Amino acid sequence: MLIFSGRFHLARFRHDRLCLVIALLSGCAAAQQQSPPPTAAKEPTSQSPPPTTATATPGGFTRKGVVGQTEIDLEVKAVERHRDLTALKMEIVSVSHDYRTPEFGYSVVIPTDFAKFWLVDPVNKKIYFTLRESDKEKAFGTRSVNAYGNIESFRKGVRYPVEVYFPPLPPDVKTVTVIAAEGLGELTGIPVTDGAPAPVAKPRQEGAPEPGGPPFQWPVMLPTGDHWAYTDDIQEYVERPERSVTQKGEEETVALRTDVLFAFDKATLSPKAAAVLDEVARETRERADPAKPPVVIEGHTDSKGEDAYNRDLSVRRAQVVRDHLARELGDDYTYEVAGKGESEPIAKNTTPDGADNPEGRARNRRVEISYKVKNRTPDVTTTVSPSTQPGGMAEPAPLRNDLGPVVGSITRGDLRLDVHPLYRDGAFLVAPFAITNNDDSFVVPVPQPFSAVFAHEFAAGAAYSGITLVDEGTKARYYGTRVSDRFWVQNQVTTIPEGATQRGFVYFPAPPEGTKSMTFEVKDLGTVKNVPIVG
């Protein structure tokens, strides 16, 4: 399904190993790479399923896609705001065959629940995880079990109502993106409704489900007692040759490479530094909120030299940057200066074999400027020149009925990745694509075929760590968003039958509003230039 990589270490290892064995022996889908962050905690189809499609209908929002090896029809009926929780109400139908799936939940054996759904607030850059029992695995809501406690299959052609619960949404959130398992992907533009009756527990319907009949009710369990709830900010990372920008929540950090600002071993600004810092001052004035002080300026070095000397040098460099910014920004801001020396590297100073890593050391030599950003909404935006930082804000995207035309393709062996137009969803840029298996057998992609062997540390471990977007005008490189170093807002490649296609996507930081196209790059495999941004 979608998305994210990461979470419970031992449990995830056991689940991955089990599903890999099943996949190799019987065609079961490969285990999800993505799972919740480590905090707070088959049968083959007879023919190739069609690419994922989505449609807004009078009764809800529908999508057809592949979960495991089964074609699934999903209809989102409602996202309801209640006092103590948010209820996602859906209807799920297995189209291709009877299906007993491990792909909608997290349990180590075969899950009984629907934990693998997420809500994304694309304007406030928040993600909401399903409410779970204290084991952090089993979600409250619908359980696919019978009266004897045994796990039931989806019967082909039977409509199953499904409820899943999330932490409560704030009153100002009017629209969310629902992220569903595997090839069902991202359903954007789902309205949040108020005033619906509170959810109630339900028993399993008596009898057996009948294809073509009325919806069949599985039991519904409400949240009780101590339970696991998790909401977090989505992290963004953009890197240019002379700087990087990281944002999580209202905190933004601009990291300037000191090689651009200072001569080797010096704390005196270079001739080029004034222009760079003047640009940073303009951006800070546009983006930083003076009502939420301070602007923090920290110096960092690589690991060469004595720690005491490096710490002193980092303090002196941070102070020089602070003085320049203060002259440009005036008295509206307050500042805090610190020197970290070599204690907080962002890259490896040495290679895995212990040799010197000049590129890593260069990235560690930096001055970071951190501040809290001004509030941004689709109606009140922060104006930033297209030549500077990211930050374009749009309305939440409507549900997209299809992926649009193929702009270009990248291959790896018998897998073909077709790139489609990019689109904006609130503060994010979504990169949708389709992966087709042209082999004459099932593909079990372990490891993930479009990940990078030597990935950037922000993306390392993601299913699509090799995929970045590049703004050719500024040479800014955009990395896929994440919640932690084990959880990214993207899906992954699962087992793909011969000739079949699976939808994929990655959420990226949005570029400035004037940006009309980007380059889609897969590290070591190829690029597709001039991919348009259509919304």
Image (spheres, rainbow, N blue to C red):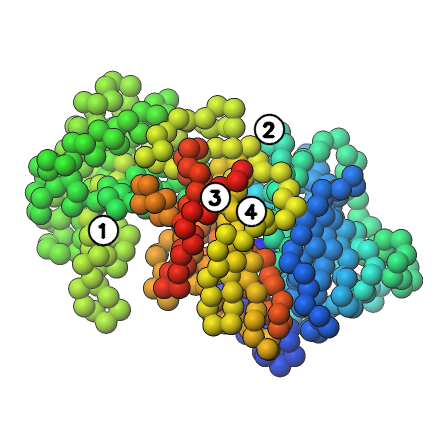
Tell me the kind of residue under disc 2.
Asp
Q: Circle 1 sits on which residue?
A: 364
Q: CA distance from mark 3 to mark 4?
A: 35 Å
Which residue appears at 63% of the width and 49% of the height? 402
Whether residues under marks 2 and 4 lie with C-beta atoms below 8 angstroms apart, the answer is no
Note whether 332 is above or below 453 in the view shown: above
Q: CA distance from mark 1 to mark 3?
A: 34 Å
Q: Circle 3 sits on which residue?
A: 532
Observer able to see residue 224: no
Q: CA distance from mark 2 to mark 3?
A: 31 Å
Question: Viewer-nearest of labels 1 and 3?
Answer: 3
Which class describes the residues within 10 Å of circle 4: few (<14), some (14-19), or many (20+)?
some
Q: Circle 2 sits on which residue?
A: 172
**Mark 3 or mark 4: which comes first in sequence?**
4
Question: For residue 230, which numbered disc appears in the image?
Answer: 4
Which class describes the residues within 10 Å of circle 3: few (<14), some (14-19), or many (20+)?
some
Query: For this view, does 273 lie left or right of residue 433?
Result: left
Observer able to see residue 498: yes
Q: CA distance from mark 2 to mark 4?
A: 19 Å
Tell me the kind of residue under disc 3.
Pro
Circle 2 SS class: loop
